[in-house]
């Protein structure tokens, strides 16, 4: 867009205020505001603005180019009870301000501009002085200053860089409009998920901005002009929250206090998942299960895609292909497998069928403007026999969600473990937009509206209904839902996979910033299709993808219809062995992974972390996207290039250990590491505790396994380990086990203190195996348990060839201290 500001400026602010730039009106002068609680409310002939301290570190700005605000309603916000604001408010003639313990919000009245500083006076977020808030017809927008030292992250599931300012900082524009993007390239936008949230990091200080508007929205990050960040929506209010850190982790914590957090997933869902479009008939499913067990490749879940259905119609079984699903599922369970089925939100319009008839009766479907039920072609229209259009549940209606939720019984009765919601952008087979007609009518929780407003939350509300339905059917079990589309706050209901990626190296590399961007945006249970969905990967690509996928929070292999076999053993024995080793590593690390996911469920801070999240003060971390941290302590640098013989790895300040060899490496520098096809470079931060177990074939084999704790000494450090039964919801009532692990180095000795168990859960009897990366030049002389010297090797402790000293105890859940002396 051409800048029209400067020449007009010369005419004076009056014109400037009303004709700032092509097609947009900019908010001009506001009279002094009215105070309402912790908010200031401004009104003029152009519109109404409220600036409210929601908490001491969260400010909400609402603007409507009308005379009054609409209903205060949100599908994304989970809680507005975020702590006291205790705002001090001052109203002056030219300026007003709103001060909390953390923030200083200063509002200039004429022209209307907002600037936020932290308590020390650092600028956090400032309206662009020339533009500020604007509107054009129903559109609303705000322009903010963007300075060269501001890094922008987040925006959910996006292609491109981790840092959202685009290549060479030429800027980039991101659209929020959930879209079925089959076979997308590494620059396709938008994709399936819309999360209008970004984080800004400036000289180590972070804040977040969340636009709570479900209409199509656009984020221009330094694109139209390098020094501005603009965002806005096609309709509705400009309703955004500014969330202060200053630590980036704190921003996520507070953003997810507002929009909710991922509930603790069932442990089996953190195992390995095998999927394809599609496994059928039953004998094929059994064959896949047999392969895993006989080849000793661990796995927990097999997935059924749309070919299990009769005519692609959800809530049916094709009885030719699956004559006895209940028996099949029971047999699989007996061998440690769970089954997840796809359930698309588009039942066939089929009078006489129980799903359609009961939906009509519950008045649960999306309507046409004339009040008739809306029908359109999706998968059931492609059925070989008796094809027909589909109807679409209105998930924005509580009764529609309840009805959908009640249908989950169809699956839970057969023993299906989890639900896969696909096609919920919603995708519809009509060109050119490939979605539902936007004039359709939704209930919108009592304030009827159309597709323009509800499109972006269709997936979120679909998963909400699935999640709540599963919970109703199995109140004592954690629901598992996977979704393709969602919106801000969707982390409360479902894990996310970024749809139909390509089986190529670019897509493998792109998966890391995409998944990290989701994590920075509150969605921490994520994983891309391993091997790639569209087309066929090479053996080498599959193996590299499997290695990277060990650290995807959701680890699933999947491929499209008609592609060659894509299982871990499909690429010859050498690749099978390496793929097995990768999946085995996943299972060895499950106690650690589960612990990290538990942390994410409590704070929102994702397990899969960009380096900037832990090292925001280190400028060298700010754009790294080809390596990542898992939790705070594991740094993973998967090999992402074909035929690579080496790769470089940046280790931030501090000491590090090579996970595989125990060799010490210094931080604050870039290392070149030689790699072979077998290599998955992993580094462990000094001070880390890594929680492991021996390889198991599925999570059902975990009870009774030794708990292995690898300790990587630093001057001093601590960690907490969370455990529970992995499946039930008893942990919500305190039936869990948390222990604190502390280590210290002093005078050449290393001491490890394990705290008393908190919580009411205990695992079955097992061994506790502590392995300490012994820093001394020679083997230790003595190991004491409290004051008791343990028998020397081979009795109570043993130095290993790998430099680790191993101490085996029975895990007794009481506090103790171990000292290893030189
Ligand atoms: O139009 O269910 O992204 O994972 O295998 C394709 C068939 C529909 C798209 C999903 C993909 C799934 C496929 N689905």
Image (spheres, rainbow, N blue to C red):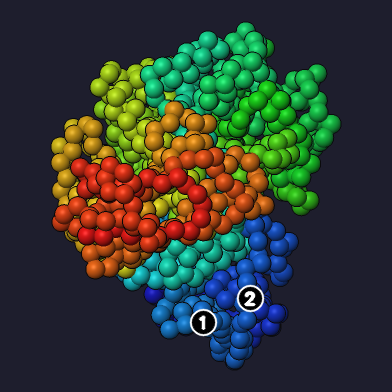
Say which residue label 2 marks.
84
Q: Quadrant of the N terminus?
A: bottom left
Q: Quadrant of residue 640?
A: top left
Depth check, front residue: 731 or 518: 731
* Residue drawn at point x = 76 percent, y = 52 percent: 447
Q: Earlier in the sequence, mark 2 or mark 1?
A: 2
Above or below, 735 against 119 in this view is above
> How would you rate the neighbour count of disc 2 (Cα within 10 Å): few for under 14, some for 14-19, many for 20 or more?
few
Residue 706: percent from the left, percent from the top? 43, 40
Depth check, front residue: 458 or 761: 761
Which residue of the protein is positioned furthest toward the top in this rendering?
320
> Is 516 situated left or right of 354 in this image?
left
> Is 501 situated left or right of 474 in this image?
left
Mark 1: C-beta under 8 Å from nearest atom of ligand 1: no
The disc label shown at residue 104, or none: 1
Q: Is residue 175 in view from this perspective?
A: no
Q: Quadrant of residue 56?
A: bottom right
Residue 616: percent from the left, percent from the top? 34, 65
């Amino acid at each position: 867009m051409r800048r029209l500001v400067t020449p007009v400026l010369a005419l004076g602010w009056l014109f400037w205020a009303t004709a700032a730039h092509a097609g947009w009106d900019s908010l001009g002068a506001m009279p002094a505001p009215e105070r309402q609680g912790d908010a200031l409310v401004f009104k003029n002939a152009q519109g109404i603005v409220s600036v409210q301290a929601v908490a001491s570190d969260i400010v909400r700005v609402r603007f409507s180019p009308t005379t009054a605000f609409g209903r205060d309603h949100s599908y994304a916000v989970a809680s507005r009870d975020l702590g006291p604001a205790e705002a001090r408010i001052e109203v002056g003639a030219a300026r007003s301000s709103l001060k909390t313990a953390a923030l200083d919000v200063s509002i200039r009245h004429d022209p209307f501009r907002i600037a936020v500083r932290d308590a020390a006076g650092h600028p956090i977020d400032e309206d662009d002085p020339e533009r500020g808030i604007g509107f054009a017809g129903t559109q609303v927008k705000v322009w903010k200053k963007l300075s060269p030292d501001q890094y922008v992250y987040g925006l959910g599931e996006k292609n491109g860089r981790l840092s959202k300012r685009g290549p060479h900082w030429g800027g980039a524009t991101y659209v929020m409009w959930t879209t079925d993007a089959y076979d997308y390239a590494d620059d396709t936008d938008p994709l399936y998920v819309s999360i209008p949230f970004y984080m800004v990091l400036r000289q180590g200080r972070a804040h977040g901005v969340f636009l709570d508007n479900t209409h199509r929205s656009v984020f221009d990050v330094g694109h139209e002009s390098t020094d501005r960040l603009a965002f806005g929506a096609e309709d509705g209010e400009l309703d955004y929250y500014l969330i202060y850190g200053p630590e980036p982790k704190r921003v996520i914590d507070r953003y997810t206090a507002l929009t909710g957090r991922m509930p603790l997933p069932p442990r089996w869902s953190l195992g390995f998942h095998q999927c394809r479009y599609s496994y059928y008939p039953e004998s094929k499913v059994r064959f896949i299960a047999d392969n895993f067990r006989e080849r000793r490749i661990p796995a927990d879940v097999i997935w059924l895609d749309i070919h299990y259905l009769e005519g692609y119609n959800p809530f049916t079984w094709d009885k030719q292909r699956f004559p006895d699903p209940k028996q099949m599922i029971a047999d699989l369970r007996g061998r440690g497998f769970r089954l997840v089925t796809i359930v698309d939100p588009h039942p066939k319009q089929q009078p006489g069928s129980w799903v359609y008839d009961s939906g009509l009766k519950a008045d649960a479907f999306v309507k046409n403007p004339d009040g008739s039920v809306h029908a359109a072609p999706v998968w059931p229209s492609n059925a070989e026999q008796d094809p027909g259009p589909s109807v679409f549940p209105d998930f924005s209606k509580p009764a529609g969600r309840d009805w959908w939720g009640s249908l989950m019984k169809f699956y839970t009765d057969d023993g299906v473990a989890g639900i896969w919601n696909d096609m919920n952008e919603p995708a519809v087979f009509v060109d050119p937009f490939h979605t539902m007609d936007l004039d359709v009518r939704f209930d919108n929780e009592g304030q009827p509206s159309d597709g323009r407003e509800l499109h972006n939350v269709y997936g979120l509300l679909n998963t909400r209904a699935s999640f709540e339905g599963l919970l109703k059917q199995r109140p004592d079990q954690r629901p598992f839902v996977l979704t393709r589309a969602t919106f801000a706050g969707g982390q409360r209901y479902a894990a996310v996979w970024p749809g139909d990626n390509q089986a190529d190296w670019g897509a493998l590399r792109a998966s890391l910033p995409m998944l990290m961007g989701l994590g920075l945006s509150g969605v921490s249970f994520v994983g891309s299709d391993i091997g790639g969905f569209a087309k066929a990967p090479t053996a080498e690509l599959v193996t590299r993808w499997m290695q990277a996928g060990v650290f995807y929070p959701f680890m699933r292999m999947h491929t499209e219809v008609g592609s060659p076999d894509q299982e871990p053993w499909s690429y010859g024995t050498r690749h099978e062995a390496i793929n097995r080793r990768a999946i085995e590593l996943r299972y060895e690390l499950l106690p650690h992974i589960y612990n990290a996911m538990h942390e994410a469920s409590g704070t929102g801070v994702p397990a899969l972390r960009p380096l900037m999240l832990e090292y925001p003060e280190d400028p060298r971390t700010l754009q790294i996207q080809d390596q990542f941290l898992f939790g705070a302590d594991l740094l993973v640098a998967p090999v992402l290039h074909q035929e690579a013989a080496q790769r470089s790895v940046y280790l931030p300040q501090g000491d590090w250990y090579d996970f595989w060899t125990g060799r010490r490496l210094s931080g604050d520098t870039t290392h070149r590491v030689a790699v072979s096809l077998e290599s998955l470079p992993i580094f462990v931060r000094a001070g880390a505790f890594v929680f492991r177990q021996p390889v198991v074939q599925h999570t059902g084999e975990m009870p009774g396994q030794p708990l292995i704790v690898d300790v990587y000494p630093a001057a001093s450090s601590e960690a907490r380990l969370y455990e529970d039964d992995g499946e039930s919801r008893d942990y919500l009532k305190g039936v869990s086990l948390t222990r604190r692990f502390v280590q210290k180095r002093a005078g050449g000795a290393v001491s490890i203190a394990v705290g008393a168990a908190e919580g009411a859960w205990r695992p079955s009897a097992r061994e506790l195996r502590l392995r300490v990366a012994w820093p001394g030049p020679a083997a230790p002389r003595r190991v004491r348990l409290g004051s008791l010297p343990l028998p020397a090797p081979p009795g109570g402790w043993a130095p290993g060839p790998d430099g680790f000293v191993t101490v085996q105890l029975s895990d007794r859940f009481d506090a103790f201290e171990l000292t290893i002396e030189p």
